[in-house]
Image (spheres, helix red, strand yellow):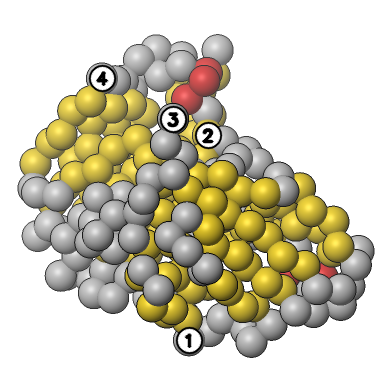
Amino acid sequence: QKEVEQNSGPLSVPEGAIASLNCTYSDRVSQSFFWYRQYSGKSPELIMSIYSNGDKEDGRFTAQLNKASQYVSLLIRDSQPSDSATYLCAVTGTYKYIFGTGTRLKVLA
Amino acid sequence: DAMVIQNPRYQVTQFGKPVTLSCSQTLNHNVMYWYQQKSSQAPKLLFHYYDKDFNNEADTPDNFQSRRPNTSFCFLDIRSPGLGDAAMYLCATSGKGQGAFGYTFGSGTRLTVV
Protein backbone atom coordinates (compact mmCIF):
# COMPACT_ATOMS: atom_id res chain seq x y z
CA GLN A 1 0.00 0.00 0.00
CA LYS A 2 1.35 3.39 -1.01
CA GLU A 3 1.95 5.69 1.93
CA VAL A 4 0.56 8.83 0.29
CA GLU A 5 -1.89 8.37 -2.57
CA GLN A 6 -3.11 10.86 -5.11
CA ASN A 7 -5.02 10.47 -8.34
CA SER A 8 -2.51 11.24 -11.09
CA GLY A 9 -5.09 12.96 -13.28
CA PRO A 10 -5.15 14.97 -15.37
CA LEU A 11 -7.95 16.80 -13.66
CA SER A 12 -9.45 19.24 -16.14
CA VAL A 13 -11.59 22.14 -14.97
CA PRO A 14 -12.86 25.22 -16.83
CA GLU A 15 -11.47 28.63 -15.94
CA GLY A 16 -13.32 30.12 -12.97
CA ALA A 17 -14.43 26.76 -11.57
CA ILE A 18 -13.38 25.13 -8.30
CA ALA A 19 -10.66 22.50 -8.57
CA SER A 20 -10.71 19.80 -5.90
CA LEU A 21 -7.56 17.75 -5.30
CA ASN A 22 -7.48 14.82 -2.91
CA CYS A 23 -4.87 12.90 -0.98
CA THR A 24 -5.00 9.94 1.40
CA TYR A 25 -2.23 8.75 3.68
CA SER A 26 -1.57 5.57 5.60
CA ASP A 27 0.45 6.63 8.67
CA ARG A 28 -2.02 7.47 11.44
CA VAL A 29 0.59 9.34 13.47
CA SER A 30 1.21 11.88 10.71
CA GLN A 31 1.22 15.38 12.11
CA SER A 32 1.88 17.85 9.31
CA PHE A 33 0.39 18.05 5.85
CA PHE A 34 1.44 20.13 2.89
CA TRP A 35 0.47 20.95 -0.65
CA TYR A 36 3.15 21.87 -3.17
CA ARG A 37 2.64 23.17 -6.66
CA GLN A 38 5.12 22.05 -9.31
CA TYR A 39 5.19 23.51 -12.79
CA SER A 40 6.65 21.33 -15.51
CA GLY A 41 10.44 21.27 -15.28
CA LYS A 42 10.48 23.37 -12.11
CA SER A 43 10.91 22.58 -8.44
CA PRO A 44 8.02 22.24 -5.97
CA GLU A 45 6.72 25.37 -4.29
CA LEU A 46 4.95 25.22 -0.93
CA ILE A 47 1.46 26.69 -1.18
CA MET A 48 -0.41 25.38 1.86
CA SER A 49 0.27 23.69 5.17
CA ILE A 50 -2.27 22.31 7.62
CA TYR A 51 -1.76 20.70 11.01
CA SER A 52 -5.19 20.27 12.62
CA ASN A 53 -8.56 18.96 11.52
CA GLY A 54 -10.77 21.32 9.61
CA ASP A 55 -10.29 23.94 6.94
CA LYS A 56 -7.53 26.45 6.39
CA GLU A 57 -7.96 29.20 3.84
CA ASP A 58 -5.34 31.31 2.11
CA GLY A 59 -6.58 33.45 -0.74
CA ARG A 60 -8.07 31.21 -3.42
CA PHE A 61 -6.72 28.08 -1.73
CA THR A 62 -8.41 26.04 1.01
CA ALA A 63 -6.81 22.99 2.59
CA GLN A 64 -9.02 20.50 4.39
CA LEU A 65 -7.82 17.85 6.83
CA ASN A 66 -9.68 14.89 8.30
CA LYS A 67 -7.30 12.82 10.41
CA ALA A 68 -9.95 10.22 11.28
CA SER A 69 -10.39 9.46 7.59
CA GLN A 70 -6.69 10.04 6.84
CA TYR A 71 -7.64 12.44 4.12
CA VAL A 72 -6.38 15.86 3.08
CA SER A 73 -7.67 17.94 0.20
CA LEU A 74 -6.95 21.18 -1.60
CA LEU A 75 -9.62 23.38 -3.13
CA ILE A 76 -8.69 26.06 -5.64
CA ARG A 77 -11.44 28.60 -6.18
CA ASP A 78 -11.76 30.68 -9.35
CA SER A 79 -9.23 28.46 -11.12
CA GLN A 80 -6.95 30.23 -13.58
CA PRO A 81 -4.93 28.82 -16.49
CA SER A 82 -1.82 29.76 -14.47
CA ASP A 83 -2.92 27.19 -11.86
CA SER A 84 -2.23 24.43 -14.39
CA ALA A 85 0.51 22.39 -12.72
CA THR A 86 1.10 19.22 -10.76
CA TYR A 87 0.04 19.40 -7.13
CA LEU A 88 2.03 17.26 -4.71
CA CYS A 89 0.65 16.23 -1.35
CA ALA A 90 3.28 15.72 1.37
CA VAL A 91 2.92 14.25 4.82
CA THR A 92 5.35 14.05 7.69
CA GLY A 93 5.28 10.36 8.61
CA THR A 94 6.76 8.51 11.55
CA TYR A 95 10.30 8.87 10.28
CA LYS A 96 10.29 11.12 7.28
CA TYR A 97 8.52 13.44 4.93
CA ILE A 98 6.61 11.52 2.25
CA PHE A 99 5.39 12.86 -1.07
CA GLY A 100 2.55 11.59 -3.19
CA THR A 101 3.09 11.26 -6.93
CA GLY A 102 1.00 14.35 -7.59
CA THR A 103 -2.18 15.25 -9.44
CA ARG A 104 -1.85 17.09 -12.73
CA LEU A 105 -4.35 19.93 -12.97
CA LYS A 106 -5.35 21.52 -16.28
CA VAL A 107 -7.39 24.69 -16.20
CA LEU A 108 -9.05 25.25 -19.55
CA ALA A 109 -9.41 28.85 -20.76
CA ASP B 1 16.14 37.42 -0.40
CA ALA B 2 16.84 34.31 1.62
CA MET B 3 16.85 31.36 -0.68
CA VAL B 4 18.14 27.97 -1.79
CA ILE B 5 20.38 28.03 -4.86
CA GLN B 6 21.32 25.02 -6.93
CA ASN B 7 24.05 24.95 -9.53
CA PRO B 8 24.08 24.21 -12.33
CA ARG B 9 20.48 24.28 -13.56
CA TYR B 10 21.32 21.79 -16.28
CA GLN B 11 24.17 19.28 -16.23
CA VAL B 12 25.16 16.88 -18.96
CA THR B 13 27.63 14.18 -18.01
CA GLN B 14 29.04 11.12 -19.68
CA PHE B 15 28.16 7.63 -18.59
CA GLY B 16 30.50 6.69 -15.74
CA LYS B 17 32.05 10.15 -15.35
CA PRO B 18 31.82 11.53 -11.80
CA VAL B 19 29.64 14.58 -11.38
CA THR B 20 28.97 16.95 -8.49
CA LEU B 21 25.85 19.03 -7.97
CA SER B 22 25.86 21.89 -5.50
CA CYS B 23 23.34 23.56 -3.23
CA SER B 24 23.69 26.64 -1.08
CA GLN B 25 21.26 28.34 1.27
CA THR B 26 20.99 31.69 2.99
CA LEU B 27 18.14 30.62 5.27
CA ASN B 28 20.45 29.30 7.98
CA HIS B 29 18.34 26.16 8.10
CA ASN B 30 19.65 23.20 10.05
CA VAL B 31 18.43 20.50 7.71
CA MET B 32 19.36 20.02 4.07
CA TYR B 33 17.91 17.32 1.85
CA TRP B 34 18.66 15.83 -1.54
CA TYR B 35 15.80 14.41 -3.56
CA GLN B 36 15.77 12.67 -6.91
CA GLN B 37 12.71 13.17 -9.08
CA LYS B 38 12.07 11.32 -12.31
CA SER B 39 9.36 12.23 -14.75
CA SER B 40 5.81 11.86 -13.35
CA GLN B 41 7.14 10.45 -10.09
CA ALA B 42 7.20 11.69 -6.53
CA PRO B 43 10.43 13.20 -5.26
CA LYS B 44 12.50 10.43 -3.69
CA LEU B 45 14.62 11.24 -0.67
CA LEU B 46 18.26 10.22 -1.12
CA PHE B 47 19.70 11.56 2.15
CA HIS B 48 19.63 14.48 4.49
CA TYR B 49 21.86 16.32 6.94
CA TYR B 50 20.62 17.45 10.32
CA ASP B 51 23.38 19.94 11.07
CA LYS B 52 26.47 17.79 10.51
CA ASP B 53 24.71 14.48 11.06
CA PHE B 54 24.36 12.55 7.82
CA ASN B 55 21.29 10.35 7.30
CA ASN B 56 21.24 8.00 4.35
CA GLU B 57 18.06 6.37 3.09
CA ALA B 58 18.29 2.59 3.10
CA ASP B 59 17.59 2.30 -0.62
CA THR B 60 19.95 5.05 -1.80
CA PRO B 61 22.58 3.46 -4.06
CA ASP B 62 26.21 3.61 -2.95
CA ASN B 63 26.88 5.49 -6.16
CA PHE B 64 25.40 8.58 -4.48
CA GLN B 65 27.39 10.43 -1.85
CA SER B 66 26.98 13.76 -0.13
CA ARG B 67 29.08 16.35 1.67
CA ARG B 68 28.11 19.26 3.84
CA PRO B 69 31.25 21.29 4.61
CA ASN B 70 29.32 24.02 6.44
CA THR B 71 25.78 25.15 7.23
CA SER B 72 25.35 26.91 3.91
CA PHE B 73 26.57 24.36 1.41
CA CYS B 74 25.71 20.81 0.51
CA PHE B 75 26.99 18.72 -2.40
CA LEU B 76 25.68 15.64 -4.17
CA ASP B 77 28.35 13.45 -5.74
CA ILE B 78 27.44 10.77 -8.24
CA ARG B 79 30.51 8.59 -8.57
CA SER B 80 29.65 6.69 -11.74
CA PRO B 81 26.46 7.99 -13.33
CA GLY B 82 24.36 5.52 -15.24
CA LEU B 83 21.57 6.20 -17.71
CA GLY B 84 19.08 5.47 -14.93
CA ASP B 85 20.43 8.38 -12.89
CA ALA B 86 19.10 10.93 -15.35
CA ALA B 87 16.61 12.94 -13.33
CA MET B 88 15.89 16.26 -11.66
CA TYR B 89 17.86 16.58 -8.44
CA LEU B 90 16.25 18.78 -5.85
CA CYS B 91 17.88 20.32 -2.81
CA ALA B 92 15.59 21.39 0.01
CA THR B 93 16.04 22.91 3.44
CA SER B 94 14.01 23.15 6.60
CA GLY B 95 14.45 24.60 10.04
CA LYS B 96 14.45 22.50 13.18
CA GLY B 97 11.61 19.99 13.22
CA GLN B 98 12.78 18.19 10.12
CA GLY B 99 10.19 19.56 7.80
CA ALA B 100 7.35 20.03 10.25
CA PHE B 101 6.83 23.47 8.76
CA GLY B 102 7.52 22.61 5.16
CA TYR B 103 10.52 22.67 2.89
CA THR B 104 12.09 25.37 0.80
CA PHE B 105 13.29 23.90 -2.47
CA GLY B 106 16.01 25.11 -4.77
CA SER B 107 15.32 25.39 -8.47
CA GLY B 108 16.71 21.92 -9.14
CA THR B 109 19.42 20.53 -11.40
CA ARG B 110 18.35 18.56 -14.43
CA LEU B 111 20.94 15.83 -15.00
CA THR B 112 21.33 14.21 -18.40
CA VAL B 113 23.62 11.18 -18.82
CA VAL B 114 24.93 10.50 -22.32
- Front of the two marks 2 and 4: 4
| Residue in view at x 42 percent, y 79 percent | B55
Identified by mark 2, the residue type is Ala
Let me know if residue B29 appears in the view: yes
- Report the front residue among B66 and B73: B73
Residue pointed to by mark 4: A59
Expressed as whole percent of the image width and height from the top left, the position of residue B57 reads 47, 80
Q: Are marks 1 and 2 in contact (CB under 8 Å)?
A: no
Give the class, few, some or many, for how many residues have Cα within 10 Å of label 3's Cα (few <14, many ≥20): few
- Report the front residue among B16 and A38: B16
Expressed as whole percent of the image width and height from the top left, the position of residue B53 reads 38, 78
Identified by mark 1, the residue type is Ala
Spatial CA span between label 1 and label 2: 31 Å
| Residue in view at x 24 percent, y 43 percent | A49
On screen, residue B46 versus residue A53, left or right, reads right
Give the class, few, some or many, for how many residues have Cα within 10 Å of label 1's Cα (few <14, many ≥20): few
Identified by mark 4, the residue type is Gly
Residue pointed to by mark 2: A85
| Residue in view at x 35 percent, y 54 percent | B29
Please give the chain letter of the residue carrying mark 3. B
Please tell me whether mark 2 sits on a helix, a strand or a loop. strand
Task: Decide which of tag 3 and tag 1 comes sooner along the chain.
Answer: 3
From what the image shows, is residue B52 above or below residue A70?
below
Identified by mark 3, the residue type is Asp
Please tell me whether mark 4 sits on a helix, a strand or a loop. loop
Task: Decide which of tag 2 and tag 4 comes sooner along the chain.
Answer: 4
The answer to which image quadrant residue B13 occupies is bottom right
Tell me the tag on residue B58: 1
Expressed as whole percent of the image width and height from the top left, the position of residue A50 reads 19, 45
